[in-house]
Structures are given as structure tokens and as C-alpha cells.
């Protein structure tokens, strides 16, 4: 089993700009070792007989990409609350640091 030393955890904490308490250092050392052990187990799985899958999406379920005309920008901006047709932009309420 791979182990993380106290110094390993402190070096990673410094890189991540984390201030860890003593009990957290021991906890993270054990948890990081567990994660690496699990990764080692995953690496050891024999995948030579596995069928390659290009993606997790069944391509037969996707629709054809058909080009269609979009809405007129000026008409959309004229109907939008806070739309600015001169700038070609929508004004939206602030959601961060409000």
C-alpha cells in the first residue's frame, strides 16, 4: 500500500494553499494513500478483451444537425426587457456580488 508522509501532505497543502490542523494532516495522509491504492487496483484490471467505446452516447439516438434560420437579432432585442439594439446586447440583472 502506498503511504503519504506528513511532509507529503504539507507540501500538497502548501500548493493548494490549505491551512491544515494536525488531525487533518493524518486524516489526509491516510485518505490520499487509499486513493492511490484504489488507482493501482484500477490500473491492474485486464482491459485487453474490452470493446472500445468511442463515447458514452449512443450515436443512433442523436438527431441530424440541420441548419435552420435563427431569429432576427433586432426583433429579439426589441422584445427583451433591458435589450440594447444599438449595442446588440441583453442587459441582465447582476447575480454575483449583488
Image (cartoon, helix red, strand yellow):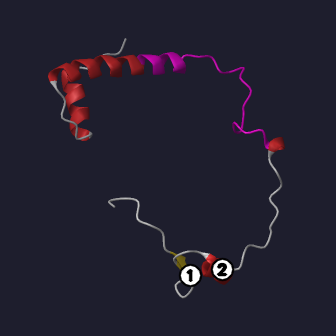
Q: Is residue 37 above or below residue 12?
A: above
Spot occupied by residue 37 in the image (x, y as percentages of width and height):
42, 16
Left or right of 64: which side holds 24? left
Mark 1 and mark 2 residues within 8 Å of each other at the beta carbon:
yes
Mark 2, other Cα within 10 Å: few <14 / some 14–19 / many ≥20: few
As drawn, which residue projects farthest toward the left? Answer: 22
Left or right of 6: which side holds 76? right
Q: Which residues are magenta?
A: 37-59
Quarter-of-image position of residue 15:
top left
Per the model, the C-alpha gap separating discs 1 and 2 is 8 Å
Going 47% across and 21% down the picture, which residue do you hit? 39
Mark 1, other Cα within 10 Å: few <14 / some 14–19 / many ≥20: few
Going 34% across and 22% down the picture, which residue do you hit? 32
Quarter-of-image position of residue 88:
bottom right
Q: Nearer the viewer, residue 49 or 86?
A: 86
Q: Name the residue tied to disc 1.
A: 88
Spot occupied by residue 2 in the image (x, y as percentages of width and height):
35, 15
Q: Name the residue tied to disc 2.
A: 73
Query: Which is more N-terminal, label 2 or label 1?
Result: 2
Going 78% across and 73% down the picture, which residue do you hit? 69
Spot occupied by residue 45 in the image (x, y as percentages of width and height):
59, 16
Helix, strand or loop status at disc 2: helix
Q: Nearer the viewer, residue 79 or 37?
A: 79
Quarter-of-image position of residue 97:
bottom left
Q: Nearer the viewer, residue 39 or 46?
A: 39
Q: Main secondary structure of the magenta part?
A: loop
Quarter of the image with the C terminus is bottom left
Q: Nearer the viewer, residue 56 or 37?
A: 56
Within the magenta stretch, is there residue 52?
yes
Quarter of the image with the N terminus is top left
Amino acid at each position: 500500500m502506498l503511504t503519504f508522509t506528513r511532509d507529503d501532505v504539507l507540501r500538497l497543502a502548501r500548493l493548494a494553499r490549505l491551512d491544515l490542523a494536525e488531525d487533518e494532516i493524518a486524516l489526509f495522509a491516510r485518505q490520499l494513500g487509499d486513493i492511490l491504492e484504489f488507482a493501482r487496483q484500477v490500473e491492474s484490471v485486464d482491459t485487453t478483451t474490452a470493446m472500445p467505446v468511442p463515447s458514452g452516447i449512443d450515436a443512433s439516438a442523436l438527431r441530424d444537425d440541420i441548419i435552420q434560420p435563427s431569429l432576427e437579432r433586432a426583433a429579439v432585442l426589441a422584445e427583451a426587457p433591458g435589450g440594447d439594439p444599438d449595442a446588440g446586447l441583453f442587459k441582465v440583472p447582476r447575480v454575483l456580488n449583488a
